[in-house]
Image (cartoon, grey):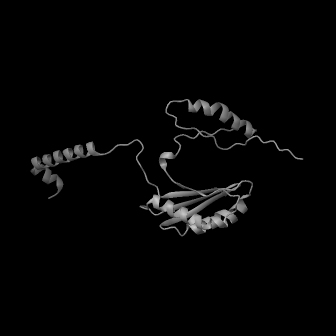
Amino acid sequence: MNFTDFALKRPITVLMLIIVVIILGSVSLTRVGLDLLPEMNFPIAAVITEYRGVGPEEIETLITRPLEETLGTVTNVKQISSITASGSSIVLIEFNMGTDMDFAALEMREKIDLVRGWLPDDASQPLVFKFDPSMMPVMVVGLGGMDDLAQLKELAEETIKPRLERLEGVASVSVQGGRKREIEVRL
């Protein structure tokens, strides 16, 4: 006997099953939580270190590699990647799902303290950041078109940033990139 025969021979039973499904669906729909920005826990952390005035090759040798080797011994590490640029080192650590990120950040700080003496004295203290999606920007605006990056940055900081900060619901505005105007005096 297939489902069609069963439905035709026992219409009351099928109707009762449909009513039960509708009632259960309605009850579960009222109990489902709804959140505009639900709390998410991504098992990702970053270690950021600045060393101004030094090229990427030196930073990779002096800072990035020692940090990668040390942070690779932290419990539950799944993958480590890094970005080394002129003046800064960013080491990204991905952990296995379900890892307690507070404990992982504490363990990372302990490991960093062990190698802090090997890092250059002029380098900043490595900072550990846990990835928090609620801190990600809701909107990113890019500017371009001008030849003078310092002038473009000044336009962003002096004109655009104050206007965006005055808008209702804006928590913060930050300007990144461009160049600062510098004057070099040689004697």
Q: Nearer the viewer, residue 171 or 164?
A: 171
Query: Compared to 178, does 45 lie above or below?
Result: below
Q: Nearer the viewer, residue 35 or 3?
A: 35
Indicate the quadrant where residue 121 lies. Answer: bottom right
Question: Above or below — where is 91 with respect to 143?
Answer: below
Is 4 situated left or right of 75 in this image? Answer: left
Quick check: 5 left or right of 113? left
Q: Is residue 111 above or below residue 183?
A: below
Say whether residue 145 is visible: no
Q: Residue furthest right?
A: 187
**Residue 186 visible from this viewpoint:** yes
Residue 33: x and y in percent read: 32, 45
Camera-side residue of 72 and 17: 72
Question: Horizontal and vertical percent for residue 142?
Answer: 63, 40
Point out the image quarter for the N terminus. Answer: bottom left
73 or 33: nearer the viewer: 73
Seen at 41% across and 49% down, the residue is 39
How many numbered discs, if any?
A: 0
Q: Quadrant of residue 89?
A: bottom right
Place of residue 63 in the rendered image (x, y in percent of width and height, measured from the top left): 66, 63
From the top left corner, tell me how far across and down residue 8 is, in percent. 12, 49
Where is residue 60, by image quadrant?
bottom right
Q: Residue at x 50, y 66 (%)?
A: 77
